[in-house]
Image (cartoon, grey):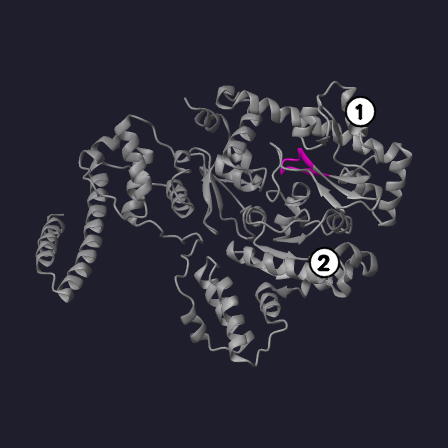
Amino acid sequence: MEINEQIRQVSSIVEIASQYTTLKRRGRKHVGLCPFHSEKTPSFTVDEEKQLFHCFGCGVGGDVFSLVMEKENLDFPEALKYLAEKYHVPLPQQRVNPQVLKLEEKIFKTNELALGFFRKNLFSTEEGMAALEYLKKRELSEDTIQALKIGYAMNAWGSLLSFFQEKNVPATLLEKAGLVLPGKKKDEYYDRFRGRIIFPIFSLTGKGVAFGGRTVIDAEPKYLNSPDTPLYSKGKLLYGLNLSKDAIRDAGEVLLVEGYTDYAALYQAGITNVVASLGTALTPHQVSQAARFAPRMIISYDGDAAGRNACARAIPLCLEKGMNVQALILPEDLDPDGFLRKYGRDRFLGLMKKSLPGLKFLIDMHSRGVKMNVPEEKAKVVRAVIKEIEKVPDSVARGEYVKQTSEFLSVDEGLLRTIIENRPPEKGAEAGDFLSPAEKRLLQILFENKDMAAFVFEEFQEGDFRGLKSEPVLTFIQESFRDGREWSFHDLKESVKAPVLDSLSRALQERTRQASVEEARDCLRALRKVVFQNRLKELQAEIARSEKRGEKEKLLTLLYQKQDITKQILAL
């Protein structure tokens, strides 16, 4: 039995779901308020027997792995490990390169020791006390400093290096962890962080993966981050998300700032639904990570020109990921930290409520310095804005953005719509009846009565599932049956898109009647008829084109094909 199946059998989806919402038994199932969206009437259903969940409000569904992946923002291997540890299932070590695993474990331990060293420096050295005084002048309390585990790197070339040498930790390992740099001479190394307040960077699960340092000796650069390591990759983490994820989920929005001190100031002020982009340009990966916890983002970068430009670059990334994005540009070129110290929490919250819609901010930025009364100049602005709107995945939202652009720029809405070409398909979850009744029933039968697969596929003909929304699922089951393998909902995750999985999880939770072989075959025949009818429509279009072009030989072949398919439909 594969490890994922072992974990699925010993884990309790009710127990896991109860970590995120309060469940009450209702008949054979458990129900509660959905942990994925705000609701007043419970629509989140957990089927303990089938080990599946589904929300009949927002359409999200899946198994215990899906639930952990969504709520903890983990990929599948991480969710597998999470559940394995929780239910004491040993993971097969041979599947992981032992050398890579060993190196990662060593770097984790090294980071943990380095963090302890930095924190001790801050509170027990004269130099650290000066840095601590600087933090207190920035109005950071000791509680905040402790919560964020802030430390200090001594202003010396080999302070950290000496600390590890006493523990017999090789400098080569410290280099791989990004803590030291090689010198000019052979086997010579020196500390990367010197004379800097240290902000540790944690993974979503709270493990130290890297460090950021803010100079207190006016060194360049002002902020210095760890390089990429086996544990850390720039642009893939949001600072503070490990502490703020629950507050973000509860608020339904995430406040994005640029740096550590901005995050610390807001967190201390009780505005805890906040993350920082580590002082670098926002990346699609970071937006996706934030979007898993909240549908709305407010970007509050520095109020100067650089901050405004960074915000203008970040907004299209949010639009492309389907996020409702707002821009909060603070007055007097202040950053959030400086604004809070000067004007306080209440005024900041007041400005948050008045934050500018992302599209409006984008239009203002594109229009800045442009002579909008000159048609050619205005046309450039219009096309630049439309180019960003085209990236919006949801067609309804995209249409609204076009309407708003029309109003903001006083351009005819119909004209704007003609500019947009090759609109991307809507990526949102399909509502309720994504699968046809025959598809849904056949899938229910094949998952709940696997012994009937032999009778179903006995009648199977090549192309029976072609073009159906359930084609990848039915094809997977058919191939598994042919190869003598079991099939389960979980095995579909890598090859089937979310709308189909969500609809399938919903279908598998429905109370169904006793299935019969004849019913299964009727479903197969009904789907075959749909496939034939779709092919007939395609042929009719091809016939019309061939008639128009005068392609007599091709036309004759197509007419024979049409006649053959019509006979097969009538036979069904």
* Label drawn at residue 206: none
Percent x, y for residue 418? 40, 71
Q: Read off the residue under disc 1.
A: 162
The amino acid marked with disc number 1 is: Ser
Percent x, y for residue 167? 76, 19
Which stretch is magenta?
A: 200-210
Indicate the quadrant where residue 196 lies. Answer: top right
Residue 205 is covered by the magenta coloring: yes
Judged from the image, the secondary structure of the residue bearing numbered disc 1 is helix
Indicate the quadrant where residue 548 lies. Answer: bottom left
Residue 36 in the figure: left or right of residue 511 = right
Percent x, y for residue 227? 66, 38
Q: Give the quadrant of the N terminus.
A: top left
Furthest-top residue in view? 168
Measuring 53% from the left and 20% from the top, which residue is drawn there? 90
Residue 124 in the figure: left or right of residue 502 = right
Indicate the quadrant where residue 169 lies. Answer: top right
Residue 405 is covered by the magenta coloring: no
* Label drawn at residue 302: 2
Q: CA distance from mark 1 to mark 2?
A: 38 Å
Residue 53 visible in image: no
